[in-house]
Image: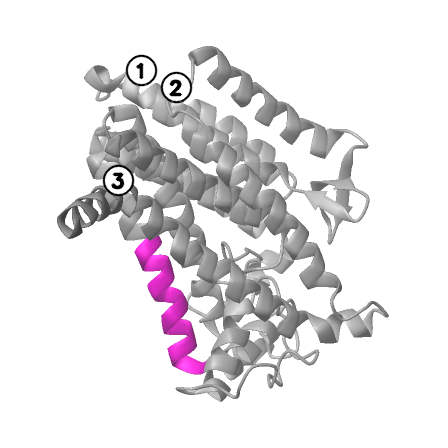
Amino acid sequence: MIDDFRTRYRLLRDRYRYELLLILPTIALVGFGLIMIYSASFPIALKKGLPETTFVLKQMLFLAVGFCCLLVAYKTPTELSPKIMYTLLGIAALMLIAVKFTPLGFAAGGAKRWFRFGPLSFQPSEFARVVLVMFLAFSLSRKAERIREFCIGFLPHVLLTAVFAVLIVIEPDFGSTIILVAIVWGMLFFAGVKPMHLISLLVIFVIGAIPYLVSKDYRLQRLYAYLDPWAYASSWGYQPIHSQMAFGTGGLTGSGLGESILKQYYLPEPHTDFIISIIGEEFGFFGVAAVVICYLVILLTGIAIALRANSLRASFLATGLVLSLAIQIFFNMGVALCLLPTKGLPLPLLSYGGSSLIFSLISIGLLMSIARETTR
């Protein structure tokens, strides 16, 4: 009887090991995220004359939708037909066009990058990023034997990425464009594209990005503030300086949940772009370390899934999804720690925001789907 129980336990453990290694830290992060969103956002809500639970209740709604999407993604086979893939790609492109060039798009902060549905908003660039990763996995696997040929393995994928990148950058959303290009570059690298082709892509992107960066004064000032935040303490250096203060105030153990001083109108966007700074202030080094460990478990599990995948397409898809999550985490934490220039990007699974949360959960669901197909 005991031996039979142990055998069943081992079978279940081996069958669902990767799914558990993905879903458990995901639940921990989104649960902790709800607590921190409430802690960081209630002063802002009260200042706007809203109930103090406004932002966390919205995030809970996003979370319910996100977990439904995660379950759908988990049950979705990774080997979607070419017709479905091209349809999704077309929908993503049309949504990016519509959000910029039609009245359906909603503008805020000088950028037109959202669809608005009552009190809720949706950012199509998040959808486009996941769809592009899925399509590249499909295309790269089909062309695997000729991946080193310029006109087969490199040029078509770069041109497709360029179309999406242009549609996103004109919103304008340069941060999301950088993330998209970095993901595609990484997928091409792991697919085996020639190094010289990849270097040329990097050079072309840098050459193209320089005129864009210098075309507006505020972009240059962000770079200057990155190099010397205290010289711009009252303007573009304000956020990075106060983010550093939050980490410094927290020390090893933090000031305690709800005890942050910097969220009291000192650090802008404490519940979105700089939520990790508030975590550092209220929970200290150990709180930030716990968050990083959860992310590492998810990313390392995703890498293991990519290595064990039962098809090249599934392996490329897992690689792209892991790159997408890892690059977003790196950029957000890099900005909060003043290692990168300031740019508004959410922290996956933790920051307030429906689009980021939902599509991060979809990415987790797709990784779980690949694991399910591999272990079954």
Q: Quadrant of residue 46?
A: bottom right
Residue 238 can be seen in this image: yes
Identify residue for label 1. 151
Q: Which residue is the site of mark 3?
A: 15
Q: Secondary structure at mark 1?
A: helix
**CA separation, marks 3 and 1?**
41 Å
Residue that badge 2 annotates: 156
Q: Residue 315 at x, y = what percent?
A: 27, 32
> Badge 3 local density, few (<14 within 10 Å), some, or many (20+)?
some
- Furthest-front residue in view? 1
Residue span colored magenta: 284-298
Element under label 2? helix
Mark 2–mark 1 distance (CA, rounded to whole Å):
7 Å
Question: Which structural element holds mark 3?
Answer: helix
Amino acid type, callout 2: Pro
Asked whether residue 228 is drawn in magenta, I would say no
- Whole-percent x, y for residue 1 in the image: 17, 48
Disc 3 versus disc 1: nearer the observer: 3
**Direction from residue 109 to residue 250 in the image, left or right:** left
The mark nearer the N terminus, 3 or 2, is 3
- The image shows residue 298 at horizontal and vertical percentages of 34, 52
Q: Name the colour scheme.
A: one colour
Q: Residue at x 64, y 41 (%)?
A: 123
Question: What's the mark number on residue 364?
Answer: none
Give the mark nearest the N terminus, 3 or 1. 3
The crowding category of the residue bearing disc 2, from other C-alpha atoms within 10 Å (few below 14, some 14 to 19, many at least 20), is: few
At x 30%, y 43%, the residue is 16
